Image (cartoon, grey):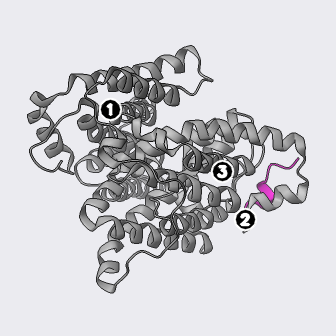
């Protein structure tokens, strides 16, 4: 079977290619099992990412169901799993706090349009050339920022006012709130994270995140622990998807959402193609980068219409999909279908989930997201380390877009200087 290199330039969804090649019961069985496996991983993670992003948990599920289905159905990768991603937590939370839910949905819709245009204009190959040090720098910066955002729910802290968005003011406010630490919530959060790490070491094929969340929910309910849950903060989840509708729109609001939409687009393109590239390295295949960007764009627009948040390719869930034996994009579509079955049949169970347990899930996500070994390796080379640190620090103290642009600019400057020195030597 060809690896897809000769067709990587095509605007043709991989699903169409698969159906033309022939799809039988043996492939269906493997995709079904993989789809169920990924859904079990995505269920607690989608809710945790939504809560951390400042929206209600069902919006994370809407994103995984609608956006994930579209990514698999139209995407340029056989194995990509789309859905809400931890990398977007900071951007989504800041946009929701500043512009409200309707402003956030319009931002997602606009970024989806931009991603689609990027794919149509064949800009996928340009995104893939972002320097490696920049990618590691902003990934580690996002991981640290997300970790800081979870400390409040992880310890059940009560702040005097709204939680600050910037990194260092946030740490200062959380430090002042330490006397309000809720021991029950802290134990639940710490135990959940510890259990996930333990199961990953002891039984790596088990769904550690789901197991930890279920055990925490049962313990809090039976022991009547004073820990905040999804039910006490948000109420129960709705039984089904909402009716699609366009978010509120005006010229003034469009102007306000344009800057965050550009950030969403940049991060979405980088994350999606990076995830597809990881899938290629695991399977020996070649994704269609521009088709992938088009699919990601359409998925974001569809997610916004159903009240979901940003969609992107998710590295951990895509890798889980591959390891579970997926063969075609139908596994990703099935993962979305399984999540839909959950909210149709068992949405009430989500109200028992402790927020501290979801924070524990994201603590593990942050640990896995941060490329610690690669960060330390790059510190041994002065050019790469300077690009890495500039990107990392600016991602922390400013935002993701500033960090990426500054890191790319510095890397480009080094490349120009190196070329000039080489020409002088000749």
Q: Left of 386 or right of it: where is 371?
A: right
Residue for badge 1: 356
144 vs 240: above or below:
above
CA–CA distance in space, label 1 to label 3: 28 Å
Determine which residue is flagged by label 2.
9
10 Å crowding of disc 1: few (<14), some (14-19), many (20+): many
Q: Position of residue 37 (x, y in %)?
A: 65, 35
Residues at marks 3 and 2 touching, judged by CB atoms closer than 8 Å: no
Q: Nearer the viewer, mark 2 or mark 1?
A: 1
Residue 338 lies, in percent from the top left, at: 64, 45
Q: Is residue 282 among the parts visible in the rendering?
A: no
Mark 2 surroundings within 10 Å by alpha-carbon count, few (fewer than 14), some (14 through 19), many (20 or more): some
Structural distance between the alpha carbons of marks 2 and 1 = 45 Å
What residue is drawn where x is 51% and y is 56%?
63
Q: Nearer the viewer, mark 3 or mark 2?
A: 3
User: Is 4 one of the magenta-colored residues?
Assistant: yes
Identified at 89% across, 43% down, the residue is 25
Over which residues does the magenta segment extend? 1-8
Q: Secondary structure at mark 2?
A: loop
In this figure, which residue is indicated by the disc labeled 3?
Answer: 337
């Amino acid at each position: 079977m060809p690896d897809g290199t000769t067709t990587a330039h095509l605007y043709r969804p991989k699903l169409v290619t698969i159906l033309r090649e022939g799809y039988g019961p043996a492939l269906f069985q493997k995709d079904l099992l993989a789809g169920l496996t990924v859904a079990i991983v995505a269920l607690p993670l989608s809710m945790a990412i939504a809560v951390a992003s400042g929206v209600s948990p069902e919006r994370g599920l809407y994103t995984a169901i609608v956006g994930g289905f579209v990514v698999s159905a139209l995407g340029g990768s056989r194995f990509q799993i789309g859905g809400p991603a931890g990398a977007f937590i900071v951007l989504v939370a800041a946009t929701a706090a500043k512009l409200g839910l309707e402003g956030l949905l319009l931002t997602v819709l606009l970024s989806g349009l931009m991603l689609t245009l990027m794919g149509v204009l064949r800009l996928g190959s340009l995104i893939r050339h972002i320097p490696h040090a920049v990618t590691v720098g902003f990934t580690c910066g996002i991981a640290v920022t997300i970790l800081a955002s979870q400390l409040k729910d992880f310890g059940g802290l009560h702040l005097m006012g709204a939680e600050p968005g910037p990194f260092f003011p946030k740490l200062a406010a959380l430090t002042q709130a330490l006397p309000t630490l809720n021991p029950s919530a802290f134990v639940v959060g710490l135990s959940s994270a510890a259990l996930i790490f333990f199961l990953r070491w002891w039984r790596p094929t088990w769904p550690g995140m789901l197991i930890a969340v279920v055990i925490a929910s049962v313990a809090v309910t039976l022991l009547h622990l004073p820990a905040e849950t999804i039910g006490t903060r948000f109420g129960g989840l709705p039984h089904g998807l909402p009716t699609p509708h366009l978010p509120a729109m005006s010229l003034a609001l469009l102007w306000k959402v344009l800057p965050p939409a550009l950030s969403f687009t940049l991060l979405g393109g980088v994350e999606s193609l990076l995830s597809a590239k990881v899938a290629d390295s695991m399977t020996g295949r070649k994704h269609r980068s521009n088709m992938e960007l088009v699919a990601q764009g359409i998925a974001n627009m569809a997610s916004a219409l159903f009240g979901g948040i940003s969609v992107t390719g998710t590295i951990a869930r895509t890798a889980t999909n591959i390891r579970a034996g997926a063969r075609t994009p139908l596994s990703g579509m099935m993962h979305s279908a399984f999540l839909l079955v959950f909210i149709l049949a068992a949405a009430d169970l989500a109200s028992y989930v402790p927020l501290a347990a979801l924070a524990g899930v994201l603590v593990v996500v942050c640990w896995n997201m941060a490329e610690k070994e690669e960060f330390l390796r790059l510190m041994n080379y002065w050019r790469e380390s300077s690009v890495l640190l500039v990107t990392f620090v600016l991602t922390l103290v400013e935002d993701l877009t500033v960090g990426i642009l500054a890191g790319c600019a510095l890397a480009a400057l080094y490349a120009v200087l190196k070329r000039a020195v080489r020409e002088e030597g000749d």
